[in-house]
Image: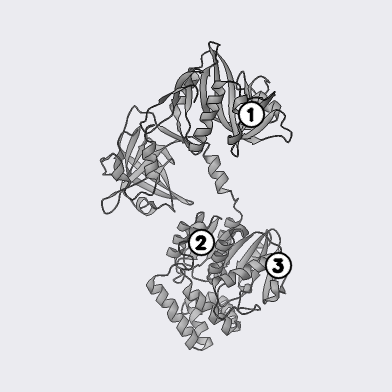
Amino acid sequence: MLEGRLAHELRGGEGVTRVLRSGRGEPVLLIHGVGLDASIWTPQFEALRDRFDVIAYDMLGHGGSSLPPAEPALADYAEQARQLLDKFGIDKAHIVGHSMGALVALEFALTHPERCRSLTALNAVYCRTRAERAGVEQRARAFEAASEPASNEAAIERWFGSPVPSALEPQAQAVRDLLGRVNPTGYARTYRLFATSDRAHEGRLGQLRMPSLFITGEHDANSSPAMSQRMAAEAARGRVEVLAGERHIMAFVSPKRVNEVLVDFLTRPTTDPVAFRRALGAFPTGVTVVSTVQPDGTPRGFTANSFSSVSLDPPLILVCIARTASSYPVFSDTRHFAVSILAEHQKDVSRLFASKAADKFKDSQWRREATGSPVIDEAAAWFDCRSHNVVDAGDHIILIGEVAAFGGSESNPLGYCRGAYVDFALSQKALAATGGRANVGAILETDGAVLLLDRGGGHYDLPEGHSLEPCGDPSSLRGVLAKLGLVAELGFLFAVFEEPGEANLQRIYYRGSIVAMPEAPGQARLFAFDDIPWAGLRDDAVRSMLRRFVREREENEFGVYVGNADEGTVHRVGKSGRPFSARSPA
């Protein structure tokens, strides 16, 4: 017998919901399927309550809960779950639903994503085929026409087999008892909604940003593996598990297998996908176009920076493809593909293949190589591959190719880091140009504002020192920042030029971001781009350089200025693929 059993009125006195609750920890809300009640989750309580606050309830029209409206919608059932969490003062919970309960869980997660730590859809239905729809509609008609025992026995046969295996007879009898106790009106209203709601979430699952698990049984004809696989592919952080040999009511029939998967999923560390992507963006990569030929003979390709070598003997490379990508079905089944490493002048090619243009190859220069796969002309390097293996990897697949042919050019590769294109060759050239003495400074920003040091009398300057490091040297840039109590993250070089009037003294400026500032920042002040005190800046060179920074930040494309205080070159890749000259560090 479960502990913590209680009944209470929903907010507003609209009805009663019977609730089972036991355990402590992060809340897990369990939503049962049509015709059952909260007690069907008894095996999950036993597996979860040592580490979770486990809550199960009777959905509308079932067990001890009130009837749904005469013409119910999924929103009515999702609202019951929301009111229940509110009643217990729970801001956020893991939501787990089975069958009809999975439809409710999906509706709740899409309507109240801020309330969901994770989503688990057990034996869920999604976009039935014509034959599957005909079958469930026939059962709905039979349910309304037949006697209650006959309808219940038909469900038992679907869920347990016919005849029911002797080893499963105790579980089958327990389910018969539940079906026999359900309110006929509530059952009929809920089943009618279940039969017609398989497309309620079509085209919406991409909005699911929480970790999402879709799990079903190999032999579940109602909630087929194909349905769960499609849902997992469409969800932003979807994962699928298909349990061999299992049927529709597997959480009750084979709780050990289901609970192992469920506990593993619920106890996995969760990450903020935006922060995780930002952290990954700190690793500079090349930019590639991955391409193949579709079954109808037309080329297909996309931009990717998830590329790596795997083996020299045999020669293997890999690329990663998101399951949600429109190209996923083509590349997951292709027999050959090519990877073109773009050259520094091919930003336009990168943007084209990252777009949703209908015919990307129409507006690019390319050729076919040995396997027939397209290769981008003028690429820094290219690899023509036969598909070697496809590896499942979370929300991506890893496509491994055996290199059949390859080539390259003398062009520098196009780079990408922290959301912007970079030129890998420039930093070394710029540093080499500094010669002897140097002052090292930084343009630091946060939330659309840049940091300046107030020198008094209306004069401002950028933070700088006589060297970059060490932090313990008060005359270094790191030392100056540490003395101010600033924590900053330096990025790429932004400008290198000679100090006006002083030969061989180079001024080097990095761009970067502010991680933390003290409550009393002293000389350090933040100015929005529109409020920068231009007249009070140190000299024309700094003024010109900072104006270029504001302009390039708006465009999100940066270059590196190399020269002197009056004249030099901004090295960045334009449409022509060539650096352009500039007067002063602008």
In the depicted structure, whether residue 98 falls above or below residue 475: below
321 vs 72, left or right, is left
Sequence-wise first label, 2 or 1: 2
Q: Position of residue 444 (x, y in %)?
A: 60, 31
Asked if residue 340 can be seen in this view, the reply is yes
Give the label on residue 87, or none: 3
**Residue found at x 59% / y 79%:** 178
Kindly identify the amino acid type of the residue bearing the numbered disc 2.
Phe
In the depicted structure, whether residue 217 falls above or below residue 327: below
**Residue found at x 44% / y 77%:** 136
Kindly identify the amino acid type of the residue bearing the numbered disc 1.
Leu
Sequence-wise first label, 3 or 2: 3
Q: Position of residue 224 (x, y in %)?
A: 44, 67
Give the label on residue 481, or none: none
Q: Nearer the viewer, residue 170 or 293?
A: 293
Cα distance between the residues tagged 2 and 1: 52 Å
Cα distance between the residues tagged 1 and 3: 51 Å
Q: Nearer the viewer, residue 203 or 408?
A: 203
Q: Residues within 10 Å of mark 3 (few under 14, many from 20)?
A: few
Do the numbered discs 3 and 2 sit on residues whose CB atoms are within 8 Å?
no
Give the label on residue 214, or none: 2
